[in-house]
Structures are given as C-alpha cells and as structure tokens.
Image: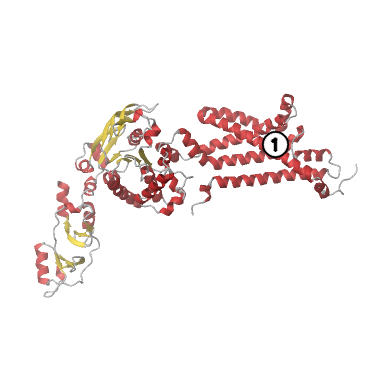
C-alpha cells in the first residue's frame, strides 16, 4: 500500500505549487492511474514516490515505511520504474539491461541468470534477444524489456510514467492488454501516469483525476467515474463520449442474452417465418448443426414451402462474449440486421440488441 | 651561389646508413608524445571531475585552457626556457597545455550527450551518483572522449617536431638539421624524412586509436539493420 498525506511540491521560482496538499491511498495489488491535463502534477506526484522529486512537505509511505527516512538509491531498488522512452542502456545487452537492479543489489551470477530467464518468459520475449543491444529491437520489444527490467528484483511496487506514450496505437493496445494480463499473474501495486483517458479507464482499477496544481478532483473506479462524474471538470475531461467509454468497461457476458430469430439449418420455412414473426424480425438467422454461425436471410426471400438452406447472407462481424458492450454497439450500428451475434469460441450464444445496450446506459 | 638542383631530393643510401639514428628519433618522438598525452589525460581528468562537481568551473577552466591553446608553441617555449631551462619539462609543459582544452571539452561533451531518459531510468532504478558516472555515463561517452584523445595525440605528434628548437623533438631534429644544412646533399633528405615520418606516425597512431575505440564500444559496432 502507498499513502500520500498532505503532499505538496513547490518548485523554486514557481508562483503556485505543482502539487498542493494531495492525499491519496493506493491499494495493494491494484493498478492506480493518475490522469489529468498537462500541468496537473501527475508526473511530479509519481516521481515523489521514488524521490526522483523531493516533496516540499507532507509524507509518503510505501509498505508502511516513510520514503523520506531512507537513502533514495535503496528505496528505488525496491520500486520498479518504467518511463516513456524506457531509457534502456544502449551499451548493455538486453540480458544486462534486465539484470540492472539485481546487479545493483549484488546478486550472484547464477541467481541473476535464472531470474532473467523467468522474466523473458513472463514478458514473452525471445531468448535470442538477450544478447542483442537495445537499438537492435523494435519499439514494442524495447517496451517489454523495460517492463522486465522494472520487475527484475520482484519489487512489490511499480511506477510507470506514460509507459506506452512512445509506441504506435496498435502496439500500444497490445502492450496495454499484455500489462493487464501480466498484472493478473504478478499482482503488483502499480501506479501509472497517463494523459489518455481511454488508457486510464482501460488499465485502472482506480483512477485519480487531477486538475492543475495537483488538485484531486475524483478518485474512484472507472465505472463510477464515467457513470457519475464528480463535477464539471471531470465531466469535460472525460469528454462527450463518456457513455461510450463506460460501455467499454462492461463485458457482454454480464447481459442476459436474447436467443434472437435464429433457426437451425434444415428447419422448415414455415417454422422460420413464425420464429421471425415472434421476434418481430424481417430476417431469420441460420445456425449450423454444431451451433456455429452460418448467416441470415430476409424473411421475404424464404421459399413458400420448403426448408431453410445454407444459402444465406454471411454475418460480416460478430462479438465474443468477452468483448465489451461498446464492441457490441459497433457491430450493431454497422450491420444490416441491427443486432450483434454473440459467440463463445465460435458457438452461438445469443444476440445483443440496441434496446439492451440503451437499458444498460440508463442504469 | 652554386646550384643544388643536381642533388636528388632523398638520398636513400644515407637513410639506410642511419637506420639506428632514425629509430632512436622515432622512439624519442613517441616518448615525448606519450608523456604529453598521458599527463594531459591525467590533468584533464582532474579538471573534468572539478567541472562535474562544480558546473560553474566549466567557463573559467575552458577559458584558461583555451587561452593556452591559442598561444603559439614557439612563444610558449620561449616563455618557459628562462624558468625551467632547456629540459624535457619545458617541452612537456607546452605540449600538455595544448591537449587540455581538446580533452576536457570532448569529455564534457560526451557526458552531456548521454540521453536524459537513460540517466533518469538509471537513477530511478537505484544507481548512486558515482556508479551512474562510472557504469553508465562514462562508457556511453567513450566514443566522444576517444575522439578527443585522437585529436590531441595527432596535434601533439605535429607539435613535438617544434620542440626540437630547444634541443628535443625526436623527428623534428631531422627537420631542423635539414633546414640548417639545406645546401648540403643530405639536407633535403633530412627534411623529407623528418616530415614524412611524423605524418606516418600520426596516421598510424590515429588508426590504432580508432581500433581501440571499436574494441571498447562493442555496442556501437552492430548498427541497426
């Protein structure tokens, strides 16, 4: 657990403090995101935890001990640190880069080698990367090395300063997913700074929204912050698509799924017509015998008297039950059938309709 | 005045007969250069350490060494001979003073060129100031520092010839003798020999230092493909 109590940072020569009387409790084993516009003191706050910046007043504790009482370099070896440009050492191989903190702590060679092997597996890096130099790796790979390096001595706390700010959006999304996956396994107390609201709500168990001068405007789970912003600042900072962002937090599997107007292949057209009618639908969905998705046909095009064949229109997109309601909404608005078919590893589970999503927004 | 046009520019027979003397002069030249660069590096290290500790010292130190760098070498010899006599010390004071500006400026430039994110990451992971300097900053500054040593060495090899004016000077002795006996058949031979060998020496040592640089900076060798 990390606590900040009445922490103030007043830079010399500045007219107003960068952070003023900030108090914050960061729960153990969670990802806490500090987010806010530039000048809100989020990076200053982060760097006061490992004393790269010394607070002017107030106290900070990590694991119950005040950080002020300790030699900074000893404190820092117990706190993982990842920065935007990663700062890998260009003159050291990836192996040596990862082993930085164990090396500082004076571990023996065998223990370091064993730990490095564990870490590259943890962050999914190839073993052959170990003897390369940082400039021989891609941006995404360097990022993974940065995370491995921060985790090397198994610190309980990890500080991340805009860790994905320097990679392209596709790689960023992938690295965010990897961080969440990693966190499920390592359960660190992570404090992450970003200016990106989407990143904050995606990664944070708790999100702290800071205003200029380090004023804490709201500190809560992303669901609560998006659902009921504390004030106008938070509302405008979250943006007009805050409803959509909130949908992104709920997986489809939390919904009671409707079965929808679907029949198995080989059903009679009479049955298909009545199923469609009971769902008030102008189309009928067709499933294969193993409950995989075959496609859909307009009710008008069904033979007067016959069976439903495989000759149906294909669904162009669908969602998995792990996807979010926001993903479902995107499928709904881009499909002819105006529903999102939900699959669980290929097997049809049901459908999501616009009404269901709307009901979810209203709650 | 009689003509000397008939004499060849280089009398190779003289060169071969005086092999021992030539080797001796080369060794002298190398010793004078080595001492100057060695002491230069030692003094530059101390001055650089002072600058790293008190950044304000950078201006005065480069100012003074810059002034020394701008004094013509002959004038510097003339200035020190009355004080330190015609000794190797006089020559070395002048030679060392020419290396300082180059060595200090390159070392500081090399250290300043270490990327900030590297420094921040290292500090954030628990490097002490001292270990940061020796394990991260100095190794990364090495290419620029070695470039400074190369420039200083090549400069000194050229200047050593001038110290022959006070009776030292390795290969410069040949040049001086050649100039004073210009009309004798071996005068031009000596001038060419002294000049040519000091150029060759400079090139060989420069290439040697390039090799050293490559050996101590293996990370810079493998350029991203």
Q: Position of residue B84 (x, y in %)?
A: 72, 26
Q: Secondary structure at mark 1?
A: helix
Seen as rendered, the residue at the extreme right is B2
Q: Is residue B56 above or below residue A350?
A: above
Q: Position of residue A188 (x, y in %)?
A: 30, 42
**Colouring mode (rainbow / by chain / secondary structure / one colour):** secondary structure
Residue B151 visible to an observer of this rendering: yes
Q: Is residue B155 left or right of residue A52?
A: right
Circle 1 Cα neighbour tier, 10 Å, few/some/many (<14 / 14–19 / ≥20): many
Identify the residue at image location x=71%, y=44%. B199
Q: How many marks?
A: 1
Q: Position of residue A152 (x, y in %)?
A: 37, 43
Q: Is residue B108 left or right of residue B208?
A: left
Q: Quadrant of residue A47?
A: top left
Residue A167 visible to an observer of this rendering: no
Where is the N terminus of chain A found, in terms of image quarters? top left
> What's the chain of the residue with tag 1?
B
Q: Nearer the viewer, residue A245 or B90?
A: B90
Q: Position of residue A288 (x, y in %)?
A: 19, 68
Seen as rendered, the residue at the extreme top is B83
Mark 1 sits on what residue? B32
Q: Nearer the viewer, residue A266 or B198?
A: B198
């Amino acid at each position: 657990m990390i606590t900040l109590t009445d922490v103030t940072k007043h830079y010399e020569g500045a007219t107003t403090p960068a952070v003023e009387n900030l108090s914050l409790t960061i729960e153990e084993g969670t990802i806490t995101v500090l987010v806010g516009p530039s000048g809100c003191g989020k990076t200053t706050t982060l760097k006061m935890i490992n004393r790269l910046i010394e607070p002017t007043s107030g106290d900070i504790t990590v694991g119950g001990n005040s950080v002020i009482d300790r030699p900074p370099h000893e404190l820092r070896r117990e706190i993982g640190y990842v920065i935007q440009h990663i700062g890998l050492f260009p003159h050291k191989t990836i192996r040596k880069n990862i082993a930085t903190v164990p090396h500082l702590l004076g571990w023996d060679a065998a223990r370091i080698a064993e730990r490095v092997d564990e870490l590259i597996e943890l962050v999914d890096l190839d073993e052959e990367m170990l003897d390369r130099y940082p400039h021989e790796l891609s941006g995404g790979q360097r990022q993974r090395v940065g995370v491995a390096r921060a985790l090397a001595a198994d610190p309980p706390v990890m500080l991340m300063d805009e860790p994905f700010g320097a990679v392209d959006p596709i790689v960023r999304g992938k690295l965010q997913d990897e961080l969440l996956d990693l966190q499920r396994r390592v359960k660190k107390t992570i404090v992450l700074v970003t200016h990106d609201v989407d990143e904050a709500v995606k990664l944070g168990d708790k999100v702290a929204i800071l205003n200029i001068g380090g004023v804490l405007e709201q500190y809560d789970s992303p669901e609560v912050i998006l659902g009921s912003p504390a004030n106008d600042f938070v509302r405008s900072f979250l943006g007009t698509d805050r409803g959509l962002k909130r949908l992104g937090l709920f997986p489809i599997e939390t919904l009671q799924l409707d079965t929808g107007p679907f029949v198995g292949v080989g059903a009679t057209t009479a049955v298909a017509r009545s199923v469609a009618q009971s769902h008030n639908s102008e189309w009928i969905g067709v499933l294969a015998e193993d409950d995989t998705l075959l496609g859909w046909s307009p009710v008008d095009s069904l033979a007067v008297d016959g069976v439903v064949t495989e000759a149906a229109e294909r669904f162009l997109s669908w969602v998995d039950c792990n996807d979010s309601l926001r993903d479902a909404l995107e499928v709904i608005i881009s499909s002819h059938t105006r529903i999102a078919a939900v699959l669980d590893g290929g097997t049809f589970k049901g459908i999501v309709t616009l009404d269901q999503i709307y009901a979810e927004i209203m709650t | 005045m009689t003509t000397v046009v008939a004499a060849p520019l280089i009398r190779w027979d003289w060169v071969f007969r005086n092999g021992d003397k030539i080797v001796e002069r080369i060794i002298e030249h190398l010793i004078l250069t080595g001492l100057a660069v060695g002491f230069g590096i030692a003094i530059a290290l101390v001055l650089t350490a002072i600058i790293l500790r008190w950044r304000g010292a950078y201006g005065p130190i480069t100012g003074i060494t810059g002034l020394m760098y701008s004094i013509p070498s002959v004038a510097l010899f003339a200035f020190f001979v009355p004080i330190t006599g015609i000794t190797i010390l006089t020559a070395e004071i002048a030679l060392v003073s020419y290396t300082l500006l180059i060595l200090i400026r390159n070392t500081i430039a090399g250290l300043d060129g270490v990327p900030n994110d590297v420094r921040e990451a290292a500090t954030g992971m628990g490097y002490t100031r001292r270990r940061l300097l020796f394990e991260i900053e100095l190794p990364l500054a090495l290419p620029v520092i070695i470039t400074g040593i190369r420039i200083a060495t090549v400069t000194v090899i050229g200047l050593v010839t001038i110290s022959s004016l006070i009776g030292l000077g390795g290969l410069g002795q040949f040049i001086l003798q050649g100039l004073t006996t210009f009309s004798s058949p071996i005068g031009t031979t000596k001038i060419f020999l002294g000049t040519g060998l000091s150029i060759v020496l400079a090139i060989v040592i420069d290439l040697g230092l390039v090799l050293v640089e490559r050996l101590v900076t293996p990370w810079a060798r493998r350029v991203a493909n």
